[in-house]
Image (cartoon, helix red, strand yellow):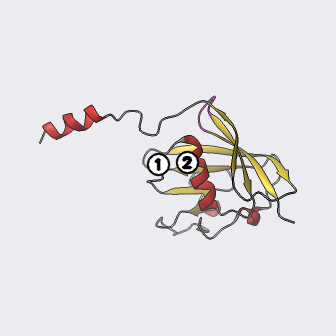
Amino acid sequence: MAKSLVLSVSIGTGCYRHIQIGEGATLSSLSSVILSAFGFYDDHLHSFFMNNRAWDSDAEFVCPGGDLDGALGFTDKVKLTKFRLMKGDKFLYIFDYGDDWRFQIKVLRVIDEPTERYAILKSVGNVSQYSAWSDDDDDEEDEDF
């Protein structure tokens, strides 16, 4: 029977989203959902660490285009069902290796019904992917050349 997961995805303190997604979704799809939920642009590489330990290649799944050396697979080929996630399980999502955005993910519930599309059930706090950038900064940079 197809199931759904309710995940708490947090970044920092006081900023999180509760997301419902079908367990048949790929890690790549989950990445897109997370980025959309936080208002991020999907313009960098990402990895999931299913043992909740950053940069541990023994439990790493990388995005297509990322370095598979040592990792277990690509995120567009692996579905959430593979992990048999249960309430309380935790794993880590890292987006943009340079800025090292770390999203902590915890399974809140497993529901015995399918979810065709994801849903944002709760949204608390805000974070800005490019908060330090502005149009003025770009203009000043150009003047130096």
Taken as a whole, is the magenta stretch helix, strand or loop?
Answer: loop
Q: Quadrant of the N terminus?
A: bottom right
Q: Quadrant of the C terminus?
A: top left
Magenta span includes 81: no
The residue tagged 2 is 35
Side of 105 relative to 12 (left or right)? right
Horizontal and vertical percent position of residue 141: 20, 38
- Along the viewing direction, whichever of 121 and 127 lies nearer the viewer: 121
- Along the viewing direction, whichever of 113 and 65 lies nearer the viewer: 113
For label 2, the SS is helix
Horizontal and vertical percent position of residue 28: 59, 61
Dots 2 and 1: beta carbons under 8 Å? yes
Question: Which residue is painted at 61% across and 59% down in the image?
Answer: 29
Question: Which residue is painted at 80% across and 59% down in the image?
Answer: 114
**Can I make out residue 81 in this image?**
yes
Question: Which residue is painted at 47% across and 48% down in the image?
Answer: 41
- Along the viewing direction, whichever of 18 and 53 lies nearer the viewer: 18
- Along the viewing direction, whichever of 45 and 40 lies nearer the viewer: 40
The amino acid beneath tag 1 is Tyr
Q: Which mark is residue 41?
A: 1
Q: Determine the image quadrant of residue 73.
A: bottom right
Side of 90 relative to 130 (left or right)? right
The amino acid beneath tag 2 is Leu
Span shown in magenta: 11-15
Give the vertical position of 41 relative to 77 (above or below): above
**Can I make out residue 53 in this image?**
no
Q: Which mark is residue 74?
A: none
- Of labels 2 and 1, earlier in sequence is 2
Q: Residues within 10 Å of mark 2 (few under 14, many from 20)?
A: some
Task: Give the Cα distance between marks 2 and 1.
Answer: 7 Å
